[in-house]
Amino acid sequence: MSSDSKAVDIIFSDLYDQYGVAEQQLRSDYLFECAQRLTPTGWLVLNCWKEHRGDGLLQELAEQFSEIHTCTTQDGNWVVLAGKKASALSSAQRKQTLRDLSNTLGFSLTPYASRLNEA
């Protein structure tokens, strides 16, 4: 990362080419670069296809990230959320945070949160 680059809190990566998910998005050097561009508490969100589910990508991510969650969307996409720092929230605190955020947003996040799996 160049010295003039600013760190960000979140990166959404949804890279596709004419063949489907761009292989760049799955490479270790790309994942490393994403991790370098995030703040210490930042998150990387990867949108992949169900065909990419497996330990290979998760192992690559585990080298750069402390907390990893996955979920499958209704359309069959496999979404990976990777946090640089593991959350210190208890289960009760997470539920309360979800309720508070749901109230702020005006819709429930519970159905989405219930789809998350810890990797």
Image (cartoon, rainbow, N blue to C red):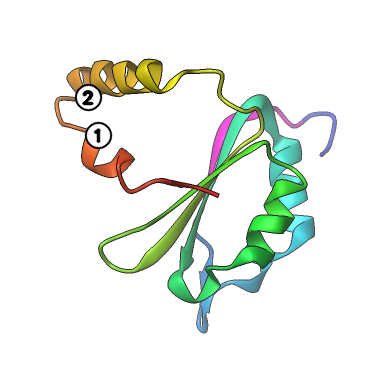
According to the picture, the residue beneath numbered tag 2 turns out to be 102
Secondary structure of the residue carrying tag 2 is helix
Rendered image quadrant of residue 66: top right
**Mark number, residue 34:** none
Quadrant, the N terminus: top right
In this picture, residue 69 sits left or right of residue 95: right
Relative to 78, 24 lies left or right:
right
Name the residue: 77% across, 48% down: 32
Q: Which residue, given by chain and number where applicable, does mark 1 sit on?
A: 109
Give me the residue at 65% from left, 62% from top.
57
Residue type (three-letter) at the residue carrying disc 2: Ser
Q: Residues within 10 Å of mark 2 (few under 14, many from 20)?
A: some
Write down the quadrant of residue 30 in the picture: bottom right
Span of residues in magenta: 5-13
- x and y percentages locating residue 115 in the rendered image: 32, 48
- Dominant SS of magenta comes to strand
Q: Disc 1 marks which amino acid? A: Leu
Q: Quadrant of residue 59?
A: bottom right
